[in-house]
Image (cartoon, rainbow, N blue to C red):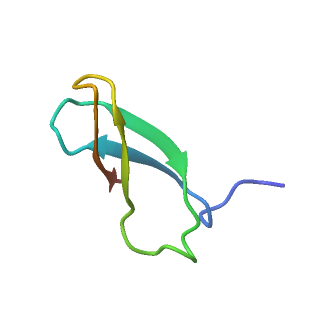
């Protein structure tokens, strides 16, 4: 089955301006808005918010 735009690949960029990113997929039907997750940033060794970037 081919991949489609229902579950696109997104980048989560750190709000601490370290340049660190996570790459994940999201379901566009369930979460049409930009995703914000609190994850670990190994550059500053702390949990910070990561925002979706397209």
Q: Residue at x 36, y 36 (%)?
A: 40
Within the image, what quadrant is residue 14 found in? top left
Q: Residue furthest top?
A: 43
Q: Residue at x 61, y 60 (%)?
A: 7
* In this view, 38 is above or below 14: below
What is the total number of numbered labels drawn onto the structure image?
0
Q: Is residue 5 left or right of residue 47?
A: right
Q: Nearer the viewer, residue 5 or 41?
A: 41
Q: Residue at x 20, y 45 (%)?
A: 15
Q: Nearer the viewer, residue 3 or 11?
A: 11
Quarter containing the N terminus? bottom right
> In the image, residue 5 lies at what x, y percent?
59, 63
* In this view, 47 is above or below 30: above
Quarter containing the C terminus? bottom left
Q: Residue furthest right?
A: 1
> In the image, residue 22 lies at what x, y percent?
43, 38
Within the image, what quadrant is residue 20 found in? top left
Q: Is residue 49 left or right of residue 35?
A: left
* In this view, 42 is above or below 27: above
Q: Is residue 36 left or right of residue 3?
A: left
Q: Is residue 39 left or right of residue 1?
A: left
Q: Residue furthest left?
A: 17
Q: Residue at x 17, y 39 (%)?
A: 16
């Amino acid at each position: 089955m081919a991949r489609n735009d229902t579950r696109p690949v997104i980048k989560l960029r750190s709000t601490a301006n370290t340049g660190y990113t996570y790459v994940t997929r999201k379901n566009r039907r369930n979460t049409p808005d930009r995703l914000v997750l609190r994850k670990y940033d190994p550059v500053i060794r702390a949990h910070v918010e990561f925002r979706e970037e397209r």
